[in-house]
Image: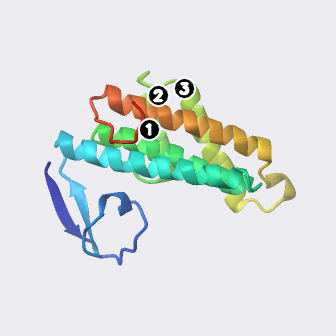
Protein backbone atom coordinates (compact mmCIF):
# COMPACT_ATOMS: atom_id res chain seq x y z
CA UNK A 1 0.00 0.00 0.00
CA UNK A 2 1.49 3.33 -1.05
CA UNK A 3 0.64 6.16 1.30
CA UNK A 4 2.23 9.54 1.73
CA UNK A 5 2.44 11.47 4.98
CA UNK A 6 1.41 15.09 4.49
CA UNK A 7 1.88 17.98 6.90
CA UNK A 8 -1.14 20.19 7.10
CA UNK A 9 -0.78 23.95 7.19
CA UNK A 10 -3.94 24.06 9.26
CA UNK A 11 -4.09 23.01 12.85
CA UNK A 12 -5.77 19.62 12.82
CA UNK A 13 -7.74 18.36 15.74
CA UNK A 14 -9.17 14.87 16.02
CA UNK A 15 -12.08 15.56 13.69
CA UNK A 16 -12.64 16.54 10.10
CA UNK A 17 -12.42 14.75 6.76
CA UNK A 18 -8.91 13.51 7.52
CA UNK A 19 -9.78 11.89 10.85
CA UNK A 20 -10.50 8.38 9.54
CA UNK A 21 -7.13 8.31 7.81
CA UNK A 22 -4.90 9.72 10.52
CA UNK A 23 -4.92 7.04 13.22
CA UNK A 24 -1.51 6.82 14.84
CA UNK A 25 -0.14 9.82 12.94
CA UNK A 26 1.46 12.78 14.71
CA UNK A 27 -0.80 15.82 15.17
CA UNK A 28 -0.71 18.13 12.18
CA UNK A 29 -0.09 15.25 9.74
CA UNK A 30 -2.42 13.00 7.84
CA UNK A 31 -2.08 10.09 5.45
CA UNK A 32 -3.12 10.47 1.83
CA UNK A 33 -3.21 7.49 -0.53
CA UNK A 34 -1.39 7.87 -3.81
CA UNK A 35 -3.73 7.80 -6.81
CA UNK A 36 -3.82 4.54 -8.66
CA UNK A 37 -2.91 2.39 -5.66
CA UNK A 38 -5.90 0.08 -5.30
CA UNK A 39 -4.79 -1.13 -1.86
CA UNK A 40 -4.63 2.47 -0.63
CA UNK A 41 -7.99 3.23 -2.20
CA UNK A 42 -9.44 0.18 -0.47
CA UNK A 43 -8.00 1.41 2.86
CA UNK A 44 -9.54 4.85 2.34
CA UNK A 45 -12.87 3.34 1.32
CA UNK A 46 -12.79 1.15 4.44
CA UNK A 47 -12.04 4.20 6.60
CA UNK A 48 -15.06 6.05 5.17
CA UNK A 49 -17.22 2.96 5.61
CA UNK A 50 -16.15 2.67 9.27
CA UNK A 51 -17.01 6.33 9.79
CA UNK A 52 -20.35 5.76 8.07
CA UNK A 53 -21.19 2.87 10.40
CA UNK A 54 -20.21 4.94 13.47
CA UNK A 55 -22.57 7.68 12.30
CA UNK A 56 -25.33 5.14 11.76
CA UNK A 57 -24.76 3.76 15.27
CA UNK A 58 -24.83 7.28 16.70
CA UNK A 59 -28.08 7.98 14.80
CA UNK A 60 -29.67 5.01 16.50
CA UNK A 61 -28.96 6.30 20.02
CA UNK A 62 -31.22 9.40 20.01
CA UNK A 63 -34.13 7.48 18.42
CA UNK A 64 -35.28 6.21 21.81
CA UNK A 65 -34.68 9.58 23.44
CA UNK A 66 -37.09 11.45 21.16
CA UNK A 67 -34.44 13.60 19.45
CA UNK A 68 -35.42 13.42 15.76
CA UNK A 69 -33.14 16.27 14.70
CA UNK A 70 -30.10 14.35 16.00
CA UNK A 71 -31.27 11.20 14.21
CA UNK A 72 -31.53 13.03 10.88
CA UNK A 73 -28.13 14.70 11.31
CA UNK A 74 -26.26 11.47 12.05
CA UNK A 75 -28.25 9.45 9.49
CA UNK A 76 -27.39 11.97 6.77
CA UNK A 77 -23.70 11.76 7.60
CA UNK A 78 -23.88 7.96 7.64
CA UNK A 79 -25.19 8.14 4.07
CA UNK A 80 -22.73 10.84 3.04
CA UNK A 81 -19.74 8.90 4.39
CA UNK A 82 -20.98 5.71 2.70
CA UNK A 83 -21.13 7.65 -0.58
CA UNK A 84 -17.57 8.90 0.08
CA UNK A 85 -16.51 5.26 0.61
CA UNK A 86 -17.93 4.36 -2.79
CA UNK A 87 -16.10 7.28 -4.40
CA UNK A 88 -12.85 6.35 -2.66
CA UNK A 89 -13.16 2.79 -3.97
CA UNK A 90 -13.24 4.33 -7.44
CA UNK A 91 -10.24 6.53 -6.71
CA UNK A 92 -12.35 9.68 -6.53
CA UNK A 93 -12.42 12.41 -3.94
CA UNK A 94 -14.86 15.28 -4.14
CA UNK A 95 -15.58 18.47 -2.25
CA UNK A 96 -17.94 18.35 0.73
CA UNK A 97 -21.73 18.09 0.83
CA UNK A 98 -23.81 19.41 -2.06
CA UNK A 99 -21.02 19.42 -4.65
CA UNK A 100 -20.14 15.84 -3.71
CA UNK A 101 -23.79 14.85 -3.96
CA UNK A 102 -23.92 16.23 -7.51
CA UNK A 103 -20.69 14.44 -8.44
CA UNK A 104 -21.99 11.22 -6.83
CA UNK A 105 -25.08 11.44 -9.04
CA UNK A 106 -22.94 11.73 -12.17
CA UNK A 107 -20.62 8.86 -11.24
CA UNK A 108 -23.12 6.39 -9.79
CA UNK A 109 -26.71 7.33 -10.70
CA UNK A 110 -26.42 8.65 -14.25
CA UNK A 111 -24.31 5.63 -15.18
CA UNK A 112 -26.96 3.27 -13.78
CA UNK A 113 -24.70 1.85 -11.07
CA UNK A 114 -27.14 2.59 -8.25
CA UNK A 115 -30.87 3.09 -8.17
CA UNK A 116 -32.01 6.71 -8.52
CA UNK A 117 -34.26 6.23 -5.47
CA UNK A 118 -31.19 5.75 -3.27
CA UNK A 119 -29.81 9.05 -4.48
CA UNK A 120 -33.20 10.67 -3.85
CA UNK A 121 -33.03 9.36 -0.27
CA UNK A 122 -29.55 10.87 0.15
CA UNK A 123 -30.72 14.24 -1.21
CA UNK A 124 -33.79 14.18 1.06
CA UNK A 125 -31.62 13.48 4.11
CA UNK A 126 -29.36 16.39 3.07
CA UNK A 127 -32.38 18.69 2.64
CA UNK A 128 -33.85 17.76 6.01
CA UNK A 129 -30.53 18.14 7.79
CA UNK A 130 -30.12 21.62 6.27
CA UNK A 131 -33.70 22.51 7.20
CA UNK A 132 -33.07 21.41 10.78
CA UNK A 133 -29.77 23.27 11.08
CA UNK A 134 -30.86 26.51 9.43
CA UNK A 135 -34.64 26.47 9.88
CA UNK A 136 -36.12 28.73 12.53
CA UNK A 137 -39.85 28.22 12.07
CA UNK A 138 -41.98 25.68 13.92
CA UNK A 139 -42.74 23.94 10.61
CA UNK A 140 -38.98 23.42 10.11
CA UNK A 141 -38.96 21.06 13.09
CA UNK A 142 -38.19 17.42 12.24
CA UNK A 143 -40.98 15.05 13.26
CA UNK A 144 -40.33 11.65 14.81
CA UNK A 145 -41.80 9.63 11.91
CA UNK A 146 -39.73 11.60 9.38
CA UNK A 147 -36.56 10.95 11.38
CA UNK A 148 -37.42 7.25 11.62
CA UNK A 149 -37.89 7.09 7.85
CA UNK A 150 -34.52 8.77 7.23
CA UNK A 151 -32.84 6.41 9.69
CA UNK A 152 -34.23 3.36 7.87
CA UNK A 153 -33.20 4.81 4.51
CA UNK A 154 -29.70 5.48 5.87
CA UNK A 155 -29.47 1.90 7.12
CA UNK A 156 -30.37 0.65 3.65
CA UNK A 157 -27.99 3.13 1.95
CA UNK A 158 -25.03 2.07 4.12
CA UNK A 159 -25.81 -1.61 3.41
CA UNK A 160 -25.93 -0.82 -0.32
CA UNK A 161 -22.54 0.92 -0.13
CA UNK A 162 -21.11 -2.05 1.75
CA UNK A 163 -22.41 -4.41 -0.96
CA UNK A 164 -21.04 -2.12 -3.65
CA UNK A 165 -17.58 -2.15 -2.06
CA UNK A 166 -17.64 -5.92 -1.71
CA UNK A 167 -18.74 -6.36 -5.35
CA UNK A 168 -15.99 -3.95 -6.42
CA UNK A 169 -13.45 -6.34 -4.92
CA UNK A 170 -13.03 -4.62 -1.60
CA UNK A 171 -12.43 -6.77 1.40
CA UNK A 172 -14.70 -6.09 4.32
CA UNK A 173 -13.11 -5.86 7.72
CA UNK A 174 -13.99 -8.10 10.64
CA UNK A 175 -17.37 -7.11 12.06
CA UNK A 176 -18.66 -5.73 8.77
CA UNK A 177 -21.48 -7.44 6.88
CA UNK A 178 -20.76 -10.13 4.38
- In the picture of the structure, the residue carrying the numbered disc 3 is 116
Specify whether 99 is left or right of 40.
right
Residue placed under numbered mark 1 in the picture: 104
Q: Residues within 10 Å of mark 2 (few under 14, many from 20)?
A: some
- Tell me whether circle 1 and circle 2 mark residues in contact (CB < 8 Å): yes
Residue at the farthest left position? 2
Residue found 78% across the figure and 41% down from its top? 145
Name the residue beneath numbered marker 2.
109
Mark positioned earlier in the residue sequence (3 or 1): 1
Q: Could you say where residue 93 lies in the image, as x and y percent from the top left? A: 34, 48
Q: What residue is at 43 percent from the left and 67 percent from the top?
A: 15
The Cα–Cα distance between marks 2 and 3, rounded to whole angstroms, is 6 Å
In three-dimensional space, the C-alpha distance between marks 1 and 2, rounded to whole angstroms, equals 7 Å
Residue 58 at what x, y percent from top left?
57, 54
Q: Position of residue 59 (x, y in %)?
A: 61, 51
Q: Is residue 116 above or below residue 31?
A: above
What's the CA distance linking mark 3 and mark 1?
Answer: 11 Å
What kind of element bears circle 2?
A: helix
**Which image quadrant: the C terminus?**
top left
Amino acid sequence: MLLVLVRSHAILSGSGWWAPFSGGVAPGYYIVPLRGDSNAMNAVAQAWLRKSKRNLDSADMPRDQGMPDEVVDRAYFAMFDAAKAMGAAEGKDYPPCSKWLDAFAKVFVETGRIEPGLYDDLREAYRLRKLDVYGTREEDRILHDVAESIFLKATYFVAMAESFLKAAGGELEAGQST
